[in-house]
Amino acid sequence: MKKKTIVLGASTNPERYSNLAVNLLESYKHPIIAFGIKQGIIGNTSISTIFPEIQDTDTITMYLGPKNQESYLSKIVALQPKRVIFNPGTENPSFYKRLEEAGIEVLEACTLVLLRTGQY
C-alpha cells in the first residue's frame, strides 16, 4: 500500500538522511512531498519551501531537530496525518504528547529501516 508522505526537513545534500529517505521513498513508489528551507530537487522530487497543506497525508517523516520543530506543530496537527515518524536525532517527547492528544500516531523510528524491512 502506497503512503502519501511528507519529508519535513528535506535536503539536496546526498549525505543527509532526509535525502536518502526521499530517494528510497521514490524507489518504493510512495507519493512524496519534500519540504525544506532551500528549494532544490532530489531524484524526481522537488523540494518546496512552502509548508504543504496536503489532505489525506498518511505519514510525516521528521528530519528537523527539536528546536526547529515547534513552528510546525499546529500545521502538522491541522493536516491530521495518520502518523509522524521521528527519525534518530529528532526525538521530542513534548511534541509527541501534543500530537497524540490530537489523535496522531507517533513513532520513534528510522524511515530508512522501516522501508527496507517492509514495516513502512
Image (tube, rainbow, N blue to C red):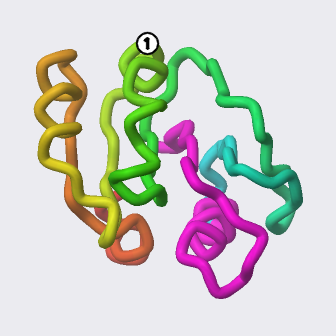
Corner quadrant of residue 84: top left
User: Going by the image, does 96 lie left or right of 119?
Assistant: left
Seen in the picture, residue 59 relative to 72 is either above or below; the reply is below
Q: Quick check: 63 above or below 56?
A: below
Q: Which residue is mark 1?
A: 78
Residue visible at 43% across and 39% down? 59
Secondary-structure class at tag 1: helix
Give the vertical position of 50 relative to 33 (above or below): above
115 or 46, nearer to the observer: 46
Q: Is residue 11 left or right of residue 9?
A: right
Which residue is at a point 56% across and 37% down the rendered structure image?
A: 4
Instruction: Name the amino acid type tagged 1.
Output: Ala
Q: Residue at x 33, y 75 (%)?
A: 117
Report the residue at 59% width, 61% height from top. Answer: 25
| Residue 89 rendering spot, x and y as whole percentages | 32, 70
* Quadrant that contains the C terminus: bottom left
Residue 33 pos. (x, y %): 68, 41
The part of the image, by quadrant, that contains residue 5 is top right
Magenta stretch: residue 26 in it? yes
Nearest the camera: 120 or 75? 75
From the viewer's perspective, tell me whether residue 45 is left or right of residue 36.
right
Binning the other alpha carbons within 10 Å of mark 1 as few (below 14), some (14 to 19) or many (20 upward) gives few
User: Which residue lies most toward the front here?
Assistant: 67
Position of residue 45 measured from the top left corner of the image (x, y, whole percent) = 81, 54
User: In the rendering, at what x and y percent does residue 108 appear?
Assistant: 20, 59
Q: Name the residue at the bottom extreme.
A: 15
40 relative to 15 in the view: left or right:
right
Instruction: Say if 104 sits above or below 80 in the image.
Output: below
Q: Is residue 16 part of the magenta span, yes or no?
A: yes
* Residue extent of the magenta highlight: 1-27
